[in-house]
Amino acid sequence: MKCLIFVVAVAAFAAVSADRIKRAPLKVSVYYESHCPDSRDFIMSQLHPHFCKVQQYLDLNLVAFGKAYSSDQGFTCQHGPKECRGNTIHNCVLKRIQDSKAQVDYVNCAMYDPDQPGHIEKTCVEESGLNVDQVQKCFTSSEGYEMMLKAEIETKTMTPGPLFVPTIVFDDVFNEKDQNQAFLNFESTLCEKLVSHGHTNVCSNGVIRNTQTC
């Protein structure tokens, strides 16, 4: 009888543990560029409008680097030196923001008009509640350089290149089908992934139930 009780207890514990694993947050990584039109469109029209609706179920990771690369001369970026500067600023800011929704708000703000002088390093930084001088010190020093190197390593490790920017990765595993679907319809892809994580009541027919405005 004691053996039976023990077996039942072990089975119950295993079921609870499996349920907790299944319901773990969905990790969403977005590898983007500060001056990339496709990154801008995805962040402003898909990531920002939907993120706050399901943020409690997500573990968001934003990395600004894209198709850039490092050399002895520094960094070379797809959209020129302004993008290298922008990527560095983004990484410095994101490091200093703990709240994921606030991170998305900053990137959305920065993407709105990245070529406007002072926009990404002052206006949007101030809106995020950060100290502008501290952010400037970061992106003009070795700290910003080291953060770009870190962003490069992660981007090249977690994506196939990347071949396309932005690259969207779920749970640290790149999948081309997921990438294409997420870029075209981030909401429905999120819903599919959240259901697979056990969050079955978050969406209905590929649409997030929560209708709040982000």
Image: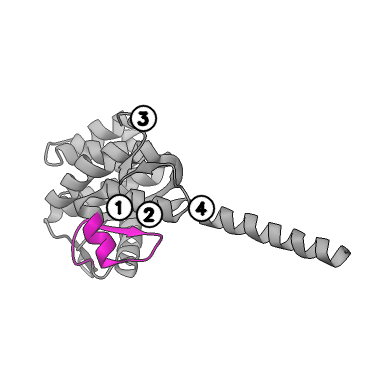
- What residue sits 22% from the left and 50% below the top? 185
- What residue sits 59% from the left and 59% below the top? 18
Identify residue for label 1: 189
Disc marking residue 129? 3
For the N terminus, give its image quadrant: bottom right
What x and y, as percent, mark residue 125? Answer: 29, 34
Q: Estimate the spatial distance between the alpha carbons at disc 3 and disc 2, rounded to whole Å.
A: 32 Å
Disc marking residue 24? 4
Of badges 4 and 3, the one in the foreground is 4
What x and y, as percent, mark residue 6? Answer: 81, 63
Of badges 2 and 4, the one in the foreground is 2
Q: Residue furthest right?
A: 1
Residues tagged 2 and 4 counted as in contact (Cβ below 8 A)? no
The magenta segment: 162-181
Q: Nearer the N terminus, badge 1 or badge 4? A: 4
- Could you tell me how many numbered marks the image carries? 4
Q: Nearer the N terminus, badge 4 or badge 3? A: 4
What x and y, as percent, mark residue 134? Answer: 36, 39
> Is residue 167 part of the magenta span, yes or no?
yes
Q: Secondary structure at mark 3?
A: loop
For residue 190, above or below residue 131: below
> Residue 55 appears in which quarter of the rendering?
top left
Q: Nearer the N terminus, badge 3 or badge 2? A: 3
For residue 36, above or below residue 119: below
For residue 32, above or below residue 174: above
> Residue 181 appears in which quarter of the rendering?
bottom left
Q: Is residue 205 left or right of residue 77?
A: right
Colour pattern of the rendering:
one colour
